Amino acid sequence: MAWFDNHCHLGDDADEMVARARAGGVVGMVTVGCDLADSRAAIVRASAHDDVWATAGVHPHEASHGVEGLADLLSEPKVVAVGEAGLDFHYDHSPRDAQRDVFAAQIGLANAHDLPLVIHTREAWEETFVLLDAEGIPERTVFHCFTGGPDEALEGLARGAHLSFSGIITFRTADDLRAAAAVCPLERAMVETDSPYLAPVPHRGKANEPAHVALVGAAVAEAMGRTPDEVAEATTANARAFYGLEGHGQA
């Protein structure tokens, strides 16, 4: 089975992580930027590997710093999306008005550059949907590390978005999330690790890595009533199409 980890955060040990992921059947990874400096680092790490790509974005935690300079990174060859961008009303590390402004700006950048938008939303579903509707949801949009239930899933799907499932779907208490996966069409699903965070069972509590994405995919398959082979094939194809990577890194 060939898996695609469409959202991870590679660090200084990226070479080792990528090597282990490849050995585990992972054929592609997207390493995600959370502020300007982090996005530049993601681009450097992606540029060292044929099967790794990068995003450039400002996470809601960093929204108080604005988006100045972000647009300059979007023309880099390895950059395949804007984000992760969105709203996080759980931690409120940046003021909510700043979060809204920076999220709206990145929606605009994705639309202007015809790039996918990678969304982070936490305890802010209604506000997220309101902003997307007001600004114009990009044609390619994904709710990364989807944590809603079936209602939020249907709201996102109604807007044409993809849902990306993380290791949370393996957690014992994640029944609502598994119900969301059950209503998600296979052609609109992707899988991710969000590493080094959210390691799936049986690695929960330890550092996560892209090599573990198959465990996420197996749990998604179970929730959907599909086989892991079906989910691997579909989610990998979905990720390649979503990020405009058809033909890249394929035998």
Image (cartoon, rainbow, N blue to C red):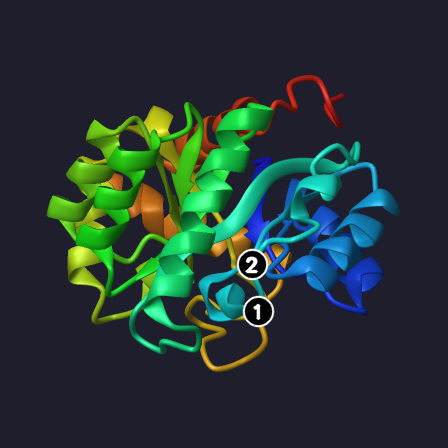
Residue 185 lies, in percent from the top left, at 26, 28
Q: Is residue 69 left or right of residue 94?
A: right
Within 10 Å of disc 2 (Cα), the crowding (few <14, some 14-19, many 20+) is: many
Amino acid type at mark 1: Asn
Q: Vertical placement of 195 versus 23: above or below?
A: below
Residue 46 lies, in percent from the top left, at 78, 47
Q: Quadrant of residue 65?
A: bottom right
Q: Is residue 223 in view from this perspective?
A: no
SS at badge 1: loop
**At 54% from the left edge and 22% from the top edge, which residue is drawn?**
241
Residue 201 lies, in percent from the top left, at 41, 69
Q: Vertical placement of 113 versus 148: above or below?
A: above
SS at badge 2: helix
Q: Quadrant of residue 91?
A: bottom left
Q: Which residue is mark 1?
A: 208
Residue 212 is labelled as 2
Q: Nearer the viewer, mark 1 or mark 2?
A: 1
**At 16% from the left edge and 37% from the top edge, which residue is drawn?**
154
Amino acid type at mark 2: His
**At 51% from the left edge and 61% from the top edge, which residue is drawn?**
59
Q: Name the outermost residue toward the top.
A: 247
Of 154 and 210, nearer the camera is 154
The number of discs equals 2
**At 59% from the left edge and 69% from the top edge, which residue is drawn?**
196
The reply to whether callout 1 and callout 2 are in contact (CB within 8 Å) is: yes
Q: Quadrant of the N terminus?
A: top right
